[in-house]
Amino acid sequence: MIEHIHKKLTVPREYHNQRIDSVLAHLLPDYSRSQISNWIKNGTIILNQKPCKPKDKVLDGDLIEINVDFTLTEQDFNHCAPEEIPLNIVYEDEDILVLNKPENMVVHPGAGNKEHTLVNALLHHAPSLHHLPRAGIIHRLDKDTTGLLVVAKTLPAHTSLIRQMQAREIQRHYVTLVQGHIISGGTIDTGFGRHPRNRLKMAVQEQGRQAITHYSVKKQYQDFTLLDVNLMTGRTHQIRVHLAYIHHPVVGDPLYGGRMRFPAHASEQLRTLLQNFKRQALHATTLSFYHPKTENELTFKAPMPDDFNLLLNTLDAHYED
């Protein structure tokens, strides 16, 4: 699968006098530092219109130009062994597979996650996926985000779905519970990249890749809001970062949620439930796209997971009293 990166970046002030490979690892979080170093060595990344080395320092305001065409590596996927892990398959035919991912399941293999991933499960269910880029997976969900994913089972289907994703024709709606009272919906449109100090986190960044999140209010509580979220782009942790950015973090989010604010006069049941809700309250509930072969529009819906339903039912009971 070929990917293209053609862009110009101005070095932000916070990266002044740092190595160019390190700076780009922050500004291009979807690519590894070793990849970036190779591109610099190959001359496909230049600094102030001149070739550079990975160790060269950049200054505030320097211009970095990137012109890269490359094939995505399948090394991690090729070393991924099939495992008999149950899958909640919502739909399947000879071209595609749609599944409802549970919590506590990593989608892609990676450092420290070579086993028990969704890829391991898919390779057991459909061994032919071994021949497809990323085992046919078109988009991803975080480890503890539940809900719908589509997987291509053939190369033509994969090509079609990737094109739809790039054209923003695949519609992905999520339901999430956030802290605080939101009056109305809106759109969050920002730059997006790796957090400058914490490599485990993503952050809104002026010089980052564009990230667009639409949200609308489904239900309001005094201290929480249930949202419908529609992704226009698919950056890592996008929904979680964007909602924290507008000061309404996702309930239970261990990375971006901050300290939980308990409602006044919360019942013991609600307080205990909120304390023990150790994952982000985020569920990919609706997925729409065009079938790669028939071109018919398909829409799938996934019911809310039990833990999320229990949380909402407890909130309903608390605020109705």
Image (cartoon, rainbow, N blue to C red):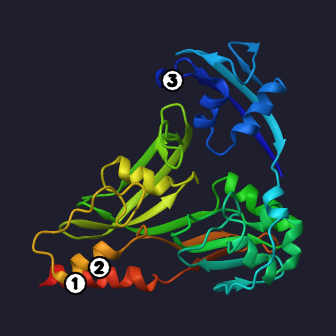
Q: Which quarter of the picture shows residue 307?
A: bottom left
Which mark's residue is nearer the viewer, 3 or 1?
1
As drawn, 36 above or below 2:
above
- Residue contact between numbered discs 2 and 1, judged by CB atoms under 8 Å: yes
- Residue 105 spot, x, y in % from top left: 60, 73
Of the numbered discs 3 and 1, the one sitting upstream in the chain is 3
In the rendered image, which residue does mark 2 sit on? 273
In the rendered image, which residue does mark 3 sit on? 12
CA separation, marks 3 and 1? Answer: 47 Å
Tell me: 98 left or right of 13: right
CA separation, marks 3 and 2? Answer: 42 Å
Name the residue type under label 3: Pro
- Residue 161 spot, x, y in % from top left: 74, 63
In the rendered image, which residue does mark 1 sit on? 269
The residue shown at (82%, 80%) is: 126
* Residue 96 appears in view: no
* Residue 293 appears in view: yes
Secondary structure found at label 3: loop
- The quadrant of the picture occupied by the C terminus is bottom left
As drawn, 296 above or below 239:
below
Residue nearest the viewer, comparing 224 with 41: 41
Secondary structure found at label 2: helix
Answer few, some or many: residues within 10 Å of disc 1's Cα (few below 14, many 20 plus, some between 14 and 19): few
Answer few, some or many: residues within 10 Å of disc 2's Cα (few below 14, many 20 plus, some between 14 and 19): some
CA separation, marks 2 and 1? Answer: 6 Å
- Residue 141 spot, x, y in % from top left: 58, 65
The residue shown at (15%, 83%) is: 320
Secondary structure found at label 1: helix
Tell me: 200 left or right of 259: right
